[in-house]
Image: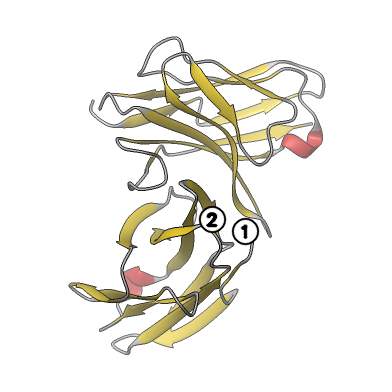
């Protein structure tokens, strides 16, 4: 299917465990982003990537790791999950310079850390 | 969001018109997006304004004043499906900054 997908859609994990959230897009967009959305904060940028093998920190990168070995995939790893990382995570992609083009969002992953 | 202000909640009646305002800090400004987000769903793109003025897309219009650091989203002929959050999103130095969103409630 064309578009942008995320997996899993829902995840419950325990404090201290490693968790990887997957993001896949089929448009060959250059830019990909990871956001978290929490009540009272809106969407906050965690990491973004301008192309394969190029990643950069966003507003709230601590506790997260990303990689982008292929253009279409942009996984987000929580190395040692904490309760403060309970959130809804959205992946997005855009075709042009990230700030000048609309972003297409995946359906989100709802993560609960117990 | 960083220096983006929009009302937290608004209520309007089906069939009416509503204007959602957004003010932002003008330093590094390159453009302004509006996104719609229904509860439990992902944001979807509505508009992108770079130049001053009003841009109309069907029932939705977006206005920008660069000198005043001000934008609004105008929704006409409101429908129940317009109940959603509306996100004011700034392009600052080619980085995207999201406002916290305005939750719009539509009454029948």
> Is A86 in front, or is A100?
A100
Name the residue at 28% across, 32% down.
Answer: A3
Q: Chain of mark 2?
A: B
In the visual, does B21 lie left or right of A27?
Answer: right
Numbered disc 1: secondary structure:
loop
Q: Give the distance between the C-alpha atoms of the residues marked 1 and 2, in whole angstroms.
A: 5 Å
Q: Residues within 10 Å of mark 1 (few under 14, many from 20)?
A: some
Instruction: Locate the C terminus of chain B and report the quarter of the image it occupies.
Output: bottom left
Which corner quadrant of the image does residue A93 belong to?
top left
Q: CB under 8 Å between callouts 1 and 2?
A: yes
Numbered disc 2: secondary structure:
strand
Residue annotated with mark 2? B98
Name the residue at 45% across, 66% down.
Answer: B86
Name the residue at 62% across, 58% down.
Answer: B1
Q: Is residue A82 above or below residue B24?
A: above
The extreme top residue here reads A69
In the visual, does A83 lie left or right of A43?
Answer: right
**How far from the left and from the top, in percent, is residue B99?**
56, 61
Residue B108 appears in the rendering: no
**How far from the left and from the top, in percent, is residue A41?**
66, 56
Label located before the other in sequence (1 or 2): 1
> Is B28 in front, or is B78?
B28
Q: Residues within 10 Å of mark 2 (few under 14, many from 20)?
A: many
- How many numbered circles are shown? 2
Which corner quadrant of the image does residue A52 belong to?
top left
Residue A64 appears in the rendering: yes
**How far from the left and from the top, in percent, is residue A35?**
56, 40
> Is B40 in front, or is B34?
B34
**How far from the left and from the top, in percent, is residue B26?**
53, 67
Name the residue at 35% across, 19% down.
Answer: A72
What number is the disc on residue B1?
1
Which corner quadrant of the image does residue A110 belong to?
top right
């Amino acid at each position: 299917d064309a578009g942008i997908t995320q997996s899993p859609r829902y995840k419950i994990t325990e404090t201290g465990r490693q968790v990887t959230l997957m993001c896949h897009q089929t448009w060959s967009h250059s830019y990909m982003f990871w956001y978290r959305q929490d009540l009272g904060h809106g969407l906050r940028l965690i990491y973004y990537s301008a192309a394969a093998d190029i990643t950069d920190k966003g507003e709230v990168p601590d506790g997260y790791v990303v990689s982008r070995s292929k253009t279409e995939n942009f996984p987000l790893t929580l190395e040692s999950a904490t309760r403060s990382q309970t959130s809804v995570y959205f992946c997005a992609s855009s075709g042009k310079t990230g700030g000048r083009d609309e972003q297409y969002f995946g359906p989100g992953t709802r993560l609960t850390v117990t | 969001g960083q220096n983006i202000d929009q009302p937290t909640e608004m209520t309007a009646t089906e069939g009416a018109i509503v204007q959602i305002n957004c003010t932002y800090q003008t330093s590094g400004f390159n453009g302004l997006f509006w996104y719609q987000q229904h509860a439990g769903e992902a944001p979807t793109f509505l508009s992108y304004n770079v130049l001053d003025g009003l841009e109309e897309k069907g029932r939705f219009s977006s206005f920008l004043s660069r000198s005043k650091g001000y934008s609004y989203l105008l929704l006409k002929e409101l429908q129940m499906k317009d109940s959603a959050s509306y996100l004011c999103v700034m392009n600052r130095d080619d980085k995207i900054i999201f406002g916290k969103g305005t939750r719009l409630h539509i009454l029948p």
